[in-house]
Image (cartoon, grey):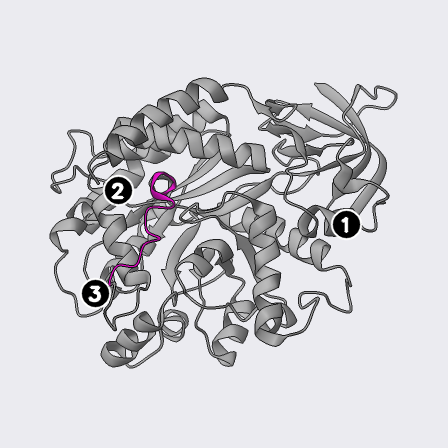
Amino acid sequence: MKNYSADRVWGPQGWVRDAQIAIEHGRLADAPAGDRGERLGRYVVPGMPNLHSHAFQRAMAGLAEKQAHAGSQQADSFWTWRETMYAFASRIGPDDLRAIAAQLYVEMLKAGYTHVCEFHYLHHQPDGRPYADPATMSLALVEAAREAGIGMTLLPALYMTGGFDGRALSERQRRFGFDVEAYLSLLQQLVKVENASLRVGVALHSLRAVPEAAMREVLGAEVTRSMPIHIHIAEQIGEVQDSLAIRNARPVEWLLDNLPVDQRWCLVHATHMTAQETQRVAQSGAVAGLCPTTEANLGDGLFPLKAYLDESGALGIGSDSHISVSPVEELRWLEYGQRLATRHRNIAASTQNRSVGETLFTAALRGGARAAGVAVGAIRTDARADLIVLDDASPLFAGRDEASLIDTFLFAGNANPVRHVMANGDWVVRDFRHRDEERIAARYRETVERLVSGV
């Protein structure tokens, strides 16, 4: 058992003063009386779960910011961005994916993310032929997470059709495709490597990519019955329009009417919902998986945050395409988007908690843990020992006390105040540096320089 102490620790009910922290076998334990151990600092908070990641897209961040249709009347959108993504994805093999993901996960840890839900659909070779081991790309991600030291919920995605009309996958989508039998076989293979840092779950890519019968078959399989379930949904207006045209129902409406959506589910984006859908998602117990920087980058739209919080809906944050890797920025822009839309301030605050920062930070910890299907996101007995130590010397916190600390952390400045990071009981970041960042970064640079040459 290792023992630590801190002036303030953010617990499930807020700040705990003069706190002790005990860690045994990677989990938080009851602290023994009298042994205060190493003092960590003034403020210790839980590591943040990142509930939505497409790791390979980290290497293409910044490559889709040129107008695709210069001089034409056709506006750039998610769908034009997707063409750039497909072209980049076609170049990536297992070693490339591991190199990119390891660099990304180092960046996540240094920013304060200690667990990642990896929504993974880059399954096969670029021409669509399976690797000799169908889990090759999945295992590259597992190894990247182990190398970096981050916890992972691996979510292999089922991807079967190219649209709501059931069309076949396009040539560039073939490497994403599995039938149900092969997909369940992949899950059965991956659960055999689960451990304290790795959980396996289900990703149904989207309603347009997975037919109803396939969804039901996957959800009824023995291997999936206790797994977290993630799905992209209602991200784009075009998706809503196609769903209405073919299924005579909006995407979220159809999902809630036809599948057993409950606390195991994470509805990623859920941007375009009616008031009734917003209420129903909140009441279902599902987590809304929000990725504000990516949603802004792609021009998706704004999630109905105030109405959802008023219904006590669960939410978490992810970095999705990784144009930003910062829980601070995700939470900041979750609030700022609402301020711009309403022309008011402090939208997420409530009568229960007037602090916007504390409201959003607490919600993202709880919702992220639920979406991950792992006991993370809290400093409490029996949770995994994932925590971050904020920098006592940061000018950011000058003159601040516990009443304003979280608000300052989220809404003041851009310097990263995360000094130390522990994941699964191991110090992976000390004094702002990851334990293996130079080697991982060097490999990443070589990999990306090769991938983008000629693009």
Q: Which residue is tagged 1?
A: 13
**Which region shows up in magenta?**
57-69
Image depth: mark 3 or mark 1 in front: 3
Residue 111 lies in quadrant: top right
Real-space CA distance between mark 2 and mark 3, rounded to the nearest whole angstrom? 18 Å
For the point 51% across and 45% down, the residue is 50
Decide if residue 115 is in sight here: yes
For the point 44% across and 65% down, the residue is 270
**Mark 2 vs 3: CB contact within 8 A:** no
Decide if residue 264 is in sight here: no
Q: Amino acid at mark 1?
A: Gln
Real-space CA distance between mark 1 and mark 2, rounded to the nearest whole angstrom? 40 Å
Q: Which mark is residue 122?
A: 2
For the point 23% across and 49% down, the residue is 86
Q: Is residue 416 left or right of residue 262?
A: right
Residue 427 rendering spot, x and y as whole percentages: 61, 22
* First in residue order: circle 1 vs circle 2: 1
Residue 372 in magenta stretch:
no
Q: Amino acid at mark 2?
A: Leu
Q: Is residue 363 left or right of residue 93?
A: right
Pick the residue in front: 427 or 178.
427
Q: Is residue 453 above or below residue 82?
A: above
* First in residue order: circle 3 vs circle 1: 1
In the picture, the quarter occupied by the N terminus is top right
Residue 169 rendering spot, x and y as whole percentages: 15, 56
Q: Amino acid at mark 3?
A: Gly
